[in-house]
Image (cartoon, rainbow, N blue to C red):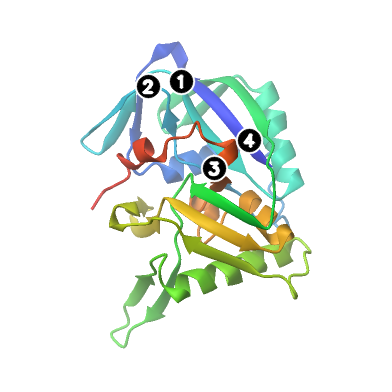
Amino acid sequence: MIIKITFKPKDNATVDLPVHYNRPLQGMFYSLMDFMEEKTPRLFTFSRIYPEDNFKVENKRLKFNGNFVVYFTSPIEKINNSIINILSKKNIFRVEKNYFELVNFKIIEKNISNNLLIKTLSPITTYISVNLPSGNRYTHYFTPYSTDFKVLIEENLKRKAELVGIDTKNMEFNIEPYGITEKNEKILFYKGVIVKGWTGYYKISGSKTLVDFALNSGIGAKNSQGFGMIVPIDEFEDVTIEDEDEFIIIK
């Protein structure tokens, strides 16, 4: 289930967020979950923030006025129901020092098929980490044109699906970049750690169940930190990825 949420700043204040706002935005979504049972998988992801008007970046702070949109998705019914329930009842929401009022929210219907052209609403990240002889830990991130990128995404997606009881033994999932260039590489920080990801358009195909699950769970790693949200482009032509890219290129 994909939920489109529109907020506006309380008292028409200027929104002032760190450019790397994944962690505080994640914190807001956790506050909308009225249960935190250990046995419930943390399978969800969310998009970047999309201001409806112009924005500017000053001293690594994102600033804008007016309404903005953020998308949330999860394959876990309990999580979705909690988000919807609290959105229906609560008036004021907080991200870092900013207070927002809910304008509206709606559930986005998806047309699922075995083959989709999708675009990212947050960067996709895939990587491996190894311990070096020196004792340091090295993380290598993969590009969308590498075989490892595709293999890790499929393996990760199947592991997540199996957490909710989906038998993926005879299922396949494939992803191919569609016009991806170096400008689609994004570097962000989460809790002070560099995370490299990729935005843009991709072709996904495979078992219909896994394609649907990918849209609901996100793909790649670190989904609950706000990475790997994807949507079919037909249903989301109002989202302009090129505009969003401008304030997450921090190299």
Three-letter amino acid code at the position of disc 4: Ile
Please report contact status of discs 2 and 1: CB closer than 8 Å, yes or no: yes
Q: Label 4, secondary structure: give it.
A: strand
Q: Position of residue 49 (x, y in %)?
A: 44, 35
Label 4 and label 3: CA atoms lie apart by: 16 Å
Confirm or deny contact between disc 2 and disc 4 (CB under 8 A).
no
Q: Residues within 10 Å of mark 4 (few under 14, many from 20)?
A: some
Residue identifier under label 2: 53
Residue 103 location (% of width, % of height): 57, 18
User: Of helix, strand and loop, which one carries label 2?
Assistant: loop
Q: Position of residue 121 (x, y in %)?
A: 48, 44
| Tag 4 and tag 3, C-beta contact below 8 Å | no
Query: Against 67, is 235 above or below?
Result: below
Return the mark for residue 67: 1
Circles 4 and 1, Cβ within 8 Å, touching? The answer is no
Q: Which residue is mark 4?
A: 3
Question: What residue would you read off at disc 3?
Answer: 233
Report the residue at 69% width, 61% height from top: 210
Disc number lying in front (3 or 1): 3
Amino acid type for the residue under numbered disc 3: Ile
> How far, Cα to Cα, is label 2 from label 4?
21 Å
